[in-house]
Structures are given as structure tokens and as C-alpha cells.
Amino acid sequence: MHESSLINISLFILFLPLLGFVITLLLGKKVKSIYIFENLIIIITFLSSVYLLFSKLSYFRTEKINAELEWFGFNNIINGTTLSINLGFMIDNITAIMLFVVALISMLVHLYSIEYMKGDERYNRYFAYLGIFTFSMNGIVLTNNILMMYIFWELVGLSSYLLIGFWFEKKTAADAGKKAFIVNRIGDIGMFAGILILFFTYNTFSFDKIFSSIGSGILPFNSDFWLTITGVLLFCGAIGKSAQFPLHVWLPDAMEGPTPVSALIHAATMVAAGVYLVVRIFGLLTADAMLFIGIIGMLSAFIPATIALTQNDIKKVLAYSTVSQLGYMIMALGIGAYQFAFFHLVTHAFFKAALFLGSGSVIHAMHHEQDIQKMGGLRKKMPLTYWTFIISSLAISGIPLTSGFLSKDGIIASSLAFSDLTGHYLFPIFSLVVAFLTAFYMFRLIIITFHGKPKDEHKFEHAHESPFLMVMPLVVLATLSIFIWYTPNPINSEQGWFLSKWIEKPVLHTPDKTRFDFMKMGNIESNLSHSYIESEVYKEAMHHSHLSAMILSGLVAVLGIFLAFTVYQWKKIDADKIAKSINPLYKFSFNKWYFDEIYNKTFVALTIGLSRVLAWFDNKIIDGIVNGSAFLTKHFSFFIGNFDKYVIDGIVNFTAYFNGFAGLIVRRIQTGKVQSYLALVIFSIVILLFIFK
Amino acid sequence: MNTYDLIFYLFAAVTILSALMVVTHKNIVHSAFYLLFTFFGVAGLYVLLAADFIAIVQLIVYVGGILILLLFGVMLTNKITNVEIRTGTINLVPAVIGVGLFAGALLASVVNSPWKIKNPEHTVPTTKLLGTLLLQEYLLIFELLGIVLLIALIGAASIARK
Amino acid sequence: MTVGLTHFLIVSTLLFSMGLYAIITRKNAIMVLMGIELILNSANINFVAFSRFGNFGYSGQLVALFVIVLAAAEAAIALAIVLNIYKNLSTVNVDEIDNLRD
């Protein structure tokens, strides 16, 4: 087993889905069964990623494998420095785990889609798009430099656009695709600016080189402030991609895409990319940048949670819960809970995929009915879907014995420790509130959908458990939502192999004075690989908060579930009455805090207005200039043409005439008579003699 | 004015006058015969220049060969029965002017040039000397000349026969 | 003034000029050939004269000899050509032969 073989496998994993995409797209119209090929490819990809994960964790657990080749280079750019732009891969444990997650969920979604999408007129193209989606996400995961990450980042944006707007005959779907793309672009501008700052400062795109330069004290524009700005700008990309406040609006609309695609987007590929980006750039975040990230994450966790309370579309509820959970991860990164954030990313990927695929199963059974008010009582008809849904919901609510409990509890404990250490007490409060809300709306969803009496008898009669290919992924994913995969101790994840062995400890490279107090290395600064979470202060704070966090998070989760049951199952409290009594708040939540309306009234209207002005400017001024110059050019050409015709041609013709005339005269000398020539020779010699006497 | 000079002027006069007749006489047969005198005059000049062998060769080759050849040419190309065996002239005026100017320039340069003159050696028979030179120093040229002459004669025969 | 190099050169110059004159003015090709012979003779006079008065030994006489040989060859060839022209064009008048013009 050699490092290079790992690189080869990772290349294989990266490019296999691309191959699948190209072949499936090209042959899709001719060969009806080409989707089988795409599925085979994704299965091979998954097996390779399992192999990669296994070999990485067993043979190279503590190593970071880098492979780089020069893409193109310039010599003598500025002051004789050479500049080379490299393509490269880096495989550490996070990469390997992430690849595994992506490949697994992508494979399950592929298999699930075989049934779910059956009968679609663009069946093969759908699988091709899934292929390129997987390819782009693998690229993001594998890269070792931010340029490549940006490239694949945009590829993810493109493929999400293709998939969200897959049913583009529906106007809402086409609009949702455009919205996702445009909103993402807004975030990407920030990211691009951040990349430019980094490249301008360090002349490289490589994460490692940037980190080591920061570690040796080189900062953008030589100021801590600009380092913060850079971090925040890069984070803007994550805001867009991970649907964080205030750019979260595209994600619920993205529900217009096919449900398996939603599962893919929400669980493993697109939105995870944002969190993954922050994980990758974690080393260069200053305290201010982290605080900014934490606050954004906190708001993104809270606002969608309140919106999810009142939504009636099964997919929208899940969409808002995704935004909320992503906010959790982002917030965790902001408060330095690096390991728990990534942990939550992985666990969330599994149970959120299970939830989405489960909802897809329900929708499939209900003949594409998405309104939960028209469902009910499906528990008996679809037992497997129901139970996997329950397990995943328990996981997302953070009930002990599930994976969600482990990661969520970790985040809450970290937020408590963080508030202990820095005094930002809003973080633990909000995370607890969100945990409560999550438990509540998830079980509201379950109770309305699966319990009670069927509201639509006709559809209920026809409902049935989904076929094997759709249920199998649910079971797999629900199984992965159990604690045992991550740690042997169901209430404390820190001793588990996932946290203690697999995920690398976070290392900051920023100057000491820009960090939070508890992250400062002080006199052991020389050891750059030393992580702050091993410092005594932090360990003690975590130890303190651990128990209370566990109790509190468990408590609020149970409380949320209990409340949901009281309201919707046992009807002790009338939901409608409450809704009426707090009507403004209910409306506020139901209308998603009026985000879309505000954006429409402000940014969109502003943009359209600006576009109108620009259009007018274009029509009148630019076109005027263009037409004017055309007019001028035309007349000038006319003038030049005449000049050509009479003057230039005149000169040319005159030359010709003159030559002809001269020839007429001179040809008389050419008599063809030898003697005349000789006489001329004699004359010439005489003349020469007189000249050169 | 001694005998030598006298003889020189005599031969010079014969040469130049007969040459003048050659170029001006209208009858081509007459011209050919005047040419005979010219060659004689030149041969005489060679004798005066102590080139006895050359003078003899001049007589043999020119008078005996070339002149006869020319006469044959005249006979073959003019209708002998026609009394008018004359040839016209062209370019008379420019030729006179041009040749006159040219001759003047040449004469001027001949007269005015500061020739490095060595006093003539004692006159000796040259045949043996020339024969030795021809077969020693100039052997290659001599042989080549023979070949050229052969080729020329073959060529002449070939051209004329066509 | 005793007869010396210059006298011979003057004679040869005059002979040369007349040869030139013949070449230029006479119509008949045979006459042109005669002019050429005159020029060759004038050249020969020069050679022999320089051989006598110059410091070149007997080389000048030898060259004169060569010239005579070449003149013979030239006369033969030229006459053959003239005969050929006469056969083809029925004239030996040089001024009528202006094929070179075309």
C-alpha cells in the first residue's frame, strides 16, 4: 500500500462519475437502458470510496497525502518571481470520510431514482446530471487548493441548476433553478474576492502554503483586519452554497426539483460544500471572522426553524430544517467546535437523506401530493417508510442513542463552553431553542403525515409501500443514524473513534492576538500543529458543560416531541386557536418572515430598476454612439473610396500610361539589328570614356 | 628618316589605305581583294617588328586560308550572274560620328600614355624560340587550341551541311 | 621622330576603327566578317608590337599566333553560319535579319 495508490484511487473516484455523465448524456437518447451503466459506475465509485476510506484510516490515519502537478506557469511576473498554478489533491481523513459520504448518498439516490423517476421522458438525462453532480462534489472534496475548489464549486452550482430546473416545463421549477443559481452567484462573488485577496497576497492557491505563510506572519495588506475580511469573504461563498441567512431563500424553492435530487442536494453534495469550505479554511479565521460566522450560523439555525413550524408542504418543512441544521454546523464552526461541526455534517447527511428519501417515498405513494394536510394515517400503509422516518426524526431532534444526539449534544456543549469562556451566552440559548423547535416541527410533520385519520380517502386507498429499490436506501440510511457507527458510548461521543481518532483536531494559523483568548497558544506557539482544544482551559470548560449540555439538549428534545404529541396527536391544545391568538406571529412564520417579499421589493426591484436605466442608457446613448460612429464611418469610407478611385488609381494608371509611353519610344531602339546595337555600344563606350577620363 | 622608317610608312600606308578601300568599296568582291593588300601590309609590319614567323603564318593562314574562305562565302551567297555584287551601307552618319569619336579617344590615349618602352633587342630568328615556348610553357594551351580548331571545323562542316 | 611603339599602335587603332566601321555600316554579312578580321589584325599588331617593345619576351608573338588560329576557326564557323542563314532566309543582309526583335 503506497500513498500514490491512494491518489490513483481518488482520481478514479473523481473521474468515474464524469465518464458516466458524458457517456450517459451522449447515448441517452439512443440507448434507453444506459442508466444502468450510470448506476454501475456510481456503485463502482462507492466501492472505491469505501476502499479509500478503509485504507486511509488503517494505513495513513495521521498522514496528509498531497499530490500536485503544475497546470500552467508564468515566468517573471513581478520582479522576476515565477508563478505557477497547480492542480492538486489532498487526502486527509476528512476528505476520505466526505468522499465516502458523498459516494454513498449519491449511490443510494441513484438507485432510489431508478424507481422514483420511472416513466420520466428525460430519464437518462436525469442520471447524467446526477453523475456530473457527484463529479463536481468529489472535486470540491478532493482538491488541495482554493482555485480548483472554486472551479468545482461553480460546477456544483451548474449541476444544481440543471437538476432543480429538471422539470423545466413547470415555470416554478425553471424559476427555482434560476433563483438557486443567481443567489449562489451572489455569495460566490464574495468568495471570488476572497480568493483574489489570498492569491494577491500569497501568490498561491494551495491551502497548505497559504496556512504556512499566515503562520509565519504574512497577512493580506499586513493587517489583521484584512485577514478577517478575507475569511468573511470566503465565507460568503458558503453563505450562498449552504443557504445561510440571508441567502437561504433559494433552498426551499429548490424543492421544485425531483425529490431524490433534494435529498442529494440537502444531504451530501451542494449544501455540504459550504460547510466543507469553512472546514477547509478554518485555519485562517480570526476571532472576528469566527464570531461573524457564528452569528450568521445562529440566525440561520433559528429563523428557518421558526418558519418550519407552520409549513404544510412536506418537502418545505424538511428544506427549512436543512437550513436550520446547516446553521447549526456553521455556528459550531464559528464557536470553534470544528470536530462537532464536521461530525454533524456527516450524521446530518445520513438522517437528512433518509428523511428526504422517506418523504419522496410518501409523495410517490400519494401520487405526487406534497401537502401534509391531505395525508395522515400512512403508518399502516407504509411501515418501513414510517419507521425509518421515525428513526431519522429522532436523530435530527437529538434523542439519545441516535447519531444526531451525539453531534448535536457536542455542539451544544461547545456553545456552553464557548459562552463560559467568552461570555457570548446567546449561542447556547439559541441552540437550545432551535433544538426544541426542531424536535417540535419534525414530530408535527410525522404526526400529521403518518398518524391520525386519512384526510384524502381516495388517495389513501391507493397508497402502498414503495418498491425495494426505494425502501432499501431508507433502511441503510436509518441504520447509519444509530450511534453505534460512531462511538461505543451512546452518550459521550468524545471517546468514540470518529472524534478521537478520525477527525483531525483543528489547528489555527492566525496570529495569536487575533484569536479568542482560549485559543491563544501563548508560549507553545512554536508548535504549530498544536490544537487549542487540547489546551487545559478548553478541556476544563468542555468538561464542565458536558453534563449540563447532555441533560439540557435531551430535555428540550423530549419536551419538543411531547409538545408536538400534545398538540397534534392528543389534541389537548388546539393548534388553530393558538395560531389565531398569535396571528401576526403565525402569519410571519407562515410567510417565511416575508424574505422573498422583502427581497422582491428591495433588491430585485432595485436590480430591475437599474436594469431599466441601463437599458435606456444602452438604447439611447450607447446605440446612439454606435450608430453615430457607423454613420461617420460610412461617410468617411465613402470619401476614402473616392480618394482611392480618383487619386490613388489615377497615380497608378498614370504610372502605367507613362511606362507604356516610354516603352513606345524606347522600343524603337530595339530594332533587332545587331549593327544598331553595336553602334549604341560604341556610343555608350565613348560617353563612358568621357565621363571617367 | 632611315630605311626602317621609310619601309614602315610604306607598309602602314598600304595597310590603312587598302583597309579603307575594304570598308568603303561598294563591290564586295573588290573589298575582298583589297583585304588581301591589307593582310600583306600587316605581314610587312610584323616583319618590321622582328616577328618573322608570325608574318609568314599571317600570309599562309590569312591570305591562303581565310581570304579564300571569304571569297567562297561571297560566291556562294551572291548570285554571281548578277552584275550588282554590291552591298549597301546603313547607319552611316552615326557610325562615322561614333567610330570617329571612339578612334579619337583611342588615339589620344595611345599618344598620351607614358609607355614603359624597352629598347628593342637584337633581332634574331624567332621560329625556334616560339617552337620551344609552344611545346614547353604553352603546351596545354597549344593542345587545347588544336582541339578547339578541330571542333570548330567539324562544327562548321555540320552547320553548313544542314 | 623615329618609328617606335606609338606608330604601330596608331596603325592598329586606325585598323580597328575601320573594322568597327565595317561591322556597323555594311549590310552584307561577309563584309561584317571582313570587319572582324580587320579588328583581329589590329589586335595582333598590338600584341606583336608590345612583344617587341615591352618587357614580356616572346609571349606576345605566341598569343598573336593563337589569335590567328582562332581567327581561322572563327572564319570557318561564321561562314558556315552565313551559308545556313542564306539557305533559310535567302539573304545575307544583316539589316534584314531582325528576328532578334521578336
Image (cartoon, coloured by chain):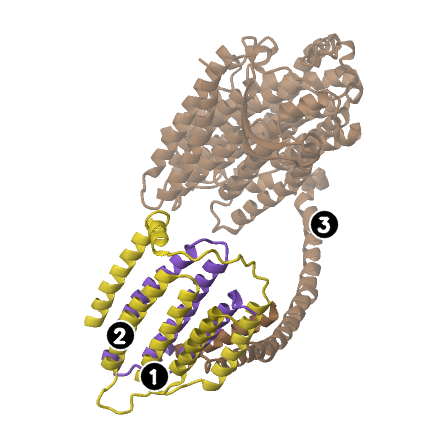
Chain colours: A brown, B yellow, C purple
Q: Of residues B44 and B91, which is closer to you in this image?
A: B44
Q: Which residue is mark 2?
A: B68
Disc 1 marks which amino acid? Glu
Which amino acid, mark 3?
Thr
Q: Quadrant of the N terminus of chain A?
A: top left
Q: Position of residue A19 (x, y in %)?
A: 41, 35
User: Which residue is at a point 44% across and 84% down the rendered structure image?
Assistant: B91
On whether disc 3 and disc 2 are found on a single subunit, the reply is no
Residue A365 at least partly seen: no
Mark in the foreground, 3 or 2: 2
- Please state the chain letter of the residue tagged with numbered disc 2 in the rendered image: B
Q: Which residue is mark 1?
A: C96
**Circle 3 or circle 1, nearest the eye:** 1
- Residue B79: numbered disc: none
Nearer to me, B50 or A250: B50
Task: Return the residue nearer the eye: A202 or A264.
Answer: A202
- Above or below for A404 versus B21: above
Give coordinates of residue A309: x percent, y percent. Answer: 63, 34
| Picture quadrant where residue B56 is located | bottom left
- Quadrant in which the C terminus of chain A appears: bottom right
Residue C53 in the image: above or below residue A497: below
Q: Amino acid at mark 2?
A: Ile
Which residue is situated farthest in the front direction here?
B2
Res. A235 image quadrant: top right
Whether residue A492 appears in this view of the structure is yes
> Residue tagged by mark 3?
A602
Contact between marks 3 and 1 (CB within 8 A): the answer is no
